[in-house]
Image (cartoon, rainbow, N blue to C red):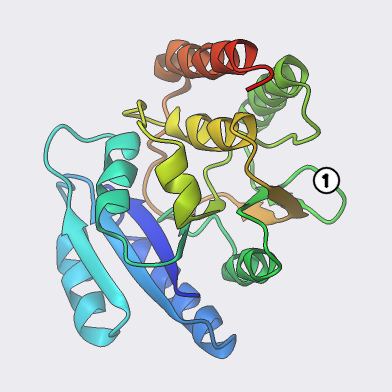
């Protein structure tokens, strides 16, 4: 099974090299057939220059440029049009996701699960340098989703998840242009009855660059997607 690591990147010149090098090392040590596909999301810094260097350095690394407008949802959709793996894991460019957790996701996919979701907030999960106000908002949002959909999973908003190719095809059309794609993909997979596993993961705050998530701008977009998928859940009962 070939694994694609899909990384959306906008203005990540200070982080992307270390992120990619760590992932390559972990996947090579684990003997996992892989490609690393980076989507340059209209960066205005030297990100593309770094990507060119990484592509020359590692045979498994490639990148594509996202056409305007920028947006993490659009960048991920661009990557999902070009990836070649049998499964794909979405990873942030800032180094917040642990390479060893990618390996753990892959092992769960090997067991036959169609999706693998991580949680930073179950036994074994770890969080480092998470701003307190963001953590509070995160827990409120995820508990709301958990109760609304009556699911045990408590970290839906985290982008770091793995899907087999058939799941990606099965959750289309993908509507989100921005960070709300992080809830659209897993909620559609759950509502459409794909088999998923949840494992503990670790997360650490970025050490370079700026976060692209603007909470004030995203509230209504998250809510729209959550309610959109919830309406599908209600209308599809018994199907």
Identify which residue is drawn at 78% across, 53% down: 125
Q: Quadrant of the C terminus?
A: top right
Residue 89, horizontal then vertical, whole percent: 49, 58
Q: Is residue 11 visible?
A: no
Residue 66 vs residue 2: left or right? left
Residue 53 vs residue 168: left or right? left
Above/below status of 153 relative to 147: below
Mark 1: few, some, or many residues within 10 Å (few <14, many ≥20)? some
Where disc 1 sits, the SS reads loop
Which of the 4 image quadrants contains residue 157?
Answer: top right
Camera-side residue: 122 or 234? 234
Q: Is residue 96 visible?
A: yes
Q: Residue furthest front?
A: 239
Residue 212, horizontal then vertical, whole percent: 37, 36
Residue 43 vs residue 166: left or right? left
| Disc 1: which residue | 122
Residue 12, horizontal then vertical, whole percent: 31, 54
Identify which residue is drawn at 48% across, 73% down: 23
Identify which residue is drawn at 30% across, 42% down: 77
Camera-side residue: 109 or 159? 109
Residue 175, horizontal then vertical, whole percent: 35, 26
Q: Residue furthest right?
A: 123
Above/below status of 193 relative to 175: below
Above/below status of 154 relative to 123: above
Q: How many marks?
A: 1
């Amino acid at each position: 099974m070939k694994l694609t690591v899909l990384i959306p990147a906008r203005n990540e010149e200070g982080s992307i090299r270390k992120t990619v090098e760590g992932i390559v090392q972990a996947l090579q040590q684990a003997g996992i057939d892989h490609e690393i596909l980076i989507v340059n999301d209209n960066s205005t810094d030297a990100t593309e220059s770094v990507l060119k260097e990484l592509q020359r350095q590692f045979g498994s690394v490639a990148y594509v440029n996202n056409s305007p407008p920028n947006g993490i949802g659009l960048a991920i959709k661009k990557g999902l049009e070009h990836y070649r793996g049998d499964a794909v894991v979405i990873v942030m460019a800032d180094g917040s996701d642990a390479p060893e957790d990618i390996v753990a996701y892959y092992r769960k996919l090997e067991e036959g699960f169609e999706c693998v979701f991580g949680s930073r907030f179950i036994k074994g999960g770890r969080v480092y340098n998470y701003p307190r106000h963001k953590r509070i908002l995160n827990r409120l949002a995820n508990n709301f989703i958990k109760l609304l959909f009556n699911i045990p999973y408590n970290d839906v908003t985290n982008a770091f998840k793995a899907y087999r190719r058939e799941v990606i095809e099965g959750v289309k059309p993908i509507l989100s242009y921005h960070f709300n794609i992080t809830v659209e993909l897993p909620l559609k997979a759950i509502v459409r009855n794909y088999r998923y596993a949840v494992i503990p993961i670790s997360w650490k705050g970025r050490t370079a660059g700026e976060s692209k998530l603007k909470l004030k701008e995203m509230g209504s977009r998250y809510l729209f997607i959550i309610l959109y998928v919830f309406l599908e859940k209600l209308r599809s009962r018994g199907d």
